[in-house]
Image (cartoon, rainbow, N blue to C red):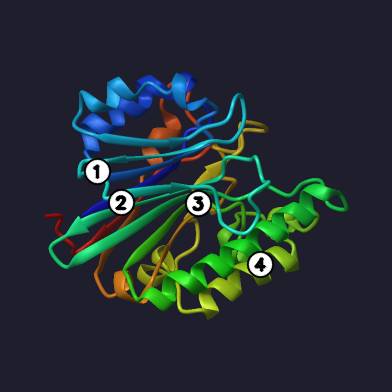
Amino acid sequence: MQIATWNVNGIKARIEGLLAWLDDVRPDIVCLQEIKSVDEGFPEHLFAERGYNVATHGQKSFNGVAILSRHPFDETSARLPGDETDEQARFLSATISTRDGALTVASLYCPNGNPLGTEKFSYKLGWMERLEAHVRGLLAEETPFVLAGDCNIIPEPIDARRPEAWVDDALFQPESRAAWRRLLGLGLVDALRATSDAGDLYTFWDYQAGAWQKNNGIRIDHALLSPQAADRLASVVIDKRVRGWERPSDHVPLIVELDIAAR
């Protein structure tokens, strides 16, 4: 089973490239972030034509997450638990049936947190605390799960071409990286780092200053696996080629393959 995640940076602006990519790669499940669309405005029919079931948690002009699945959803759940007043659309989970039982997949769009010293950074850290609490509950159920998305965290210096350029950015702050390490400390597995310790593995290149041409990238799009899902990890691929397409997102897809078959 292939599970992909991609921050498309606006579903309307990237729809042609996204559809072309789906026709080419045909992943089983796709987690999308920053769709920038309300639920009613999401072009669900274009994905249904390609055999995908669609779940969305949208927000006008900002944020928004979606999950596309070739397999029926047993259930879906929007909004990260812990703060029911949070109106930002950043979390969506879905459960599907497999031959080995249920698999839960969540699409994450973690807060950016910039600028430092503002409520945006406090919100980022609070959101990560709520995610940690949610993960603890999922782990207690011992059900395989995958958290995939734009986590807006650069875990280590190796995950940036120029780490010194990010020392004053929320993505690379000690508090942000500590929140990441706490998730790993619970037993989650960083899928890419479970398969490679190489450098120059990036998922984001800014539109400015020729970042793509200079390979001045960072790795902020991640897939975190529960121990049960990590046991089935077969491969991880960063699909860099789409960054060179016409009107690309500044992010590229991350594709995780698990040795799990749907029913």
Q: CA distance from mark 2 to mark 1?
A: 6 Å
Q: CA distance from mark 4 to mark 2?
A: 25 Å
Q: CA distance from mark 3 to mark 1?
A: 20 Å
Image coordinates of residue 184 in percent, x first then y, are: 52, 75
Asked if residue 162 can be seen in this view, the reply is yes
Kindly identify the residue that appears in the image at 35 percent across and 69 percent down.
195
The type of residue carrying mark 2 is Ile
Mark 3 lies on residue: 202
- Asked whether the residues under the numbered discs 3 and 2 touch, taking CB atoms below 8 Å apart as contact, a structural biologist would say no
Kindly identify the residue that appears in the image at 26 percent across and 58 percent down.
257
Q: CA distance from mark 3 to mark 4?
A: 17 Å
Q: Residues within 10 Å of mark 3 (few under 14, many from 20)?
A: many
Q: Residues within 10 Å of mark 4 (few under 14, many from 20)?
A: some
Mark 1 lies on residue: 27
The type of residue carrying mark 4 is Arg
The type of residue carrying mark 1 is Pro
Between tags 3 and 4, which lies in front? 4
In the shown orientation, is residue 229 left or right of residue 179? left
Mark 3: which secondary structure?
loop
Q: CA distance from mark 3 to mark 2?
A: 18 Å
Tell me which label, 3 or 2, sits earlier in the chain.
2
Mark 1: which secondary structure?
loop
Residue 177: give its label.
4
Q: Farthest residue toward the right?
A: 117
- Asked whether the residues under the numbered discs 3 and 4 touch, taking CB atoms below 8 Å apart as contact, a structural biologist would say no
